[in-house]
Amino acid sequence: MVEGYRIIGAEMSPYSVKVRAYFRYKDIPHHWVLRNAASQAEYQKHAKIPVIPLVVTPEGAGIQDSTPIIDRMEELFPEPSIHPDDPVARFISMLIEEFGDEWGNKWMFHYRWARDVDQRASAGRIARMMAPKASEAELAAFAEQVRTRMTGRVWFVGSSEANAPQIESGFQEMLGLLEAHLATRPYLFGGRPAYGDFGLWGQFYELWTDPTTGALIEGNAPNVLAWIHRMLWPRAEGAFQSWQQIAPTMMPILTKQVGRMFWPWTLANEKALADGAEEFSVRLGDHVWTQKPQKYHARSLGMLRAKYAGTPGRKDLDMILAAAGCLAGMLA
């Protein structure tokens, strides 16, 4: 039996830092282990799929996928809860967590590999992380290999020349909406971090570390920047707020981002997978989005639907989701 939990991850993985921030908030004893520093035998023993983060429990069990990791830990360490008492705010937090994981990742991955300056910075960081003892010549060659491989994978999140304007304008709109929302509260749902904070923050933290989006955040969104720093070591600074308190600035995020962009995409992605399509197109706002289906997202959508089905007294919640454009398809 090992002492404490082991989080095997990477600083450049939004899902890894998301889990690390959660463990820090809960004060759960843990060791942060870089993926390349973990023994291959340990990783292969516990990882069912080749992704990070991987959490190894003190009992020697492995848990993967950031959302199930947090759900499991929340059962074991329920206090302080990351779920608001208000059932509407509670589910909206869960929806924001899913939005961050699945749609926010499109901003992060696209910007990280779309421009030369970001490609070079990111490939260099990855090369040094994976080969810290390599010579400068070896690092340069390795970085170029990483750059070639990663720029060839951007299609996975829908990044393309055609979709780039939607991704970038969407991120910049979200940055402005989030800046307004965080102007009067330290966290998304009030005085302490919620489920939704961890999912959205992981992507924004990575965006802040890259040249192009880091400049956008630092130059335009001081409240978002403070939240990014705050979430590195989150702590309770007050109570959760009710839906009525957060609605004035959260509802624009739901209508303009979640309901207008993410939710139509997620339903179209699900249909494409069911139809066995190799590619799908869907109108998001004023533009058409085209990409190959993302298989994993159908699973995470199922988990979100289960959480929605378990929400008691959904009348008020359904009215809000309908107004935001997120109710259709919430029940499979």
Image (tube, helix red, strand yellow):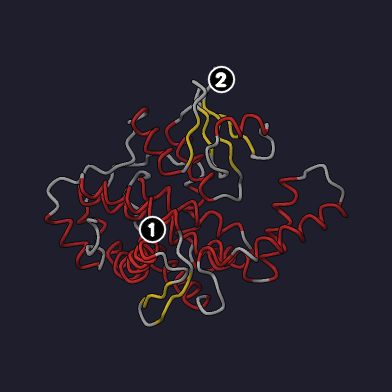
Query: Could you tell me if residue 90 is visible in this image?
Result: no
User: Which of 237 and 42 lies nearest the eye of the viewer?
Assistant: 42
- Return the residue nearer the eye: 240 or 30: 30
Q: Amino acid at mark 2?
A: Val
Q: Describe the element under mark 1 as helix, strand or loop.
A: helix
Determine the residue located farthest toward the front in the rendered image: 276
Find residue 257 and report its horizontal and vertical position in percent. 36, 68
The image quadrant where one finds the C terminus is bottom left
Residue of label 2 = 2
- Report which quarter residue 183 is drawn in: bottom left
In the displayed image of the protein, which residue is found farthest to the top?
1
Q: Secondary structure at mark 2?
A: loop
Is residue 291 shown left or right of residue 266? right
Amino acid carrying mark 1 in the image: Phe
* Residue plotted at (68% across, 31% down): 39
Dot 1: within a 10 Å radius of its alpha carbon, few (fewer than 14), some, or many (20 or more) residues? many
Mark seen at residue 178: none
Residue 169 rendering spot, x and y as whole percentages: 47, 75
Q: Is residue 132 left or right of residue 152?
A: right
> Residue at 51% across / 34% down in the picture?
55
Disc 1 marks which residue?
Answer: 99
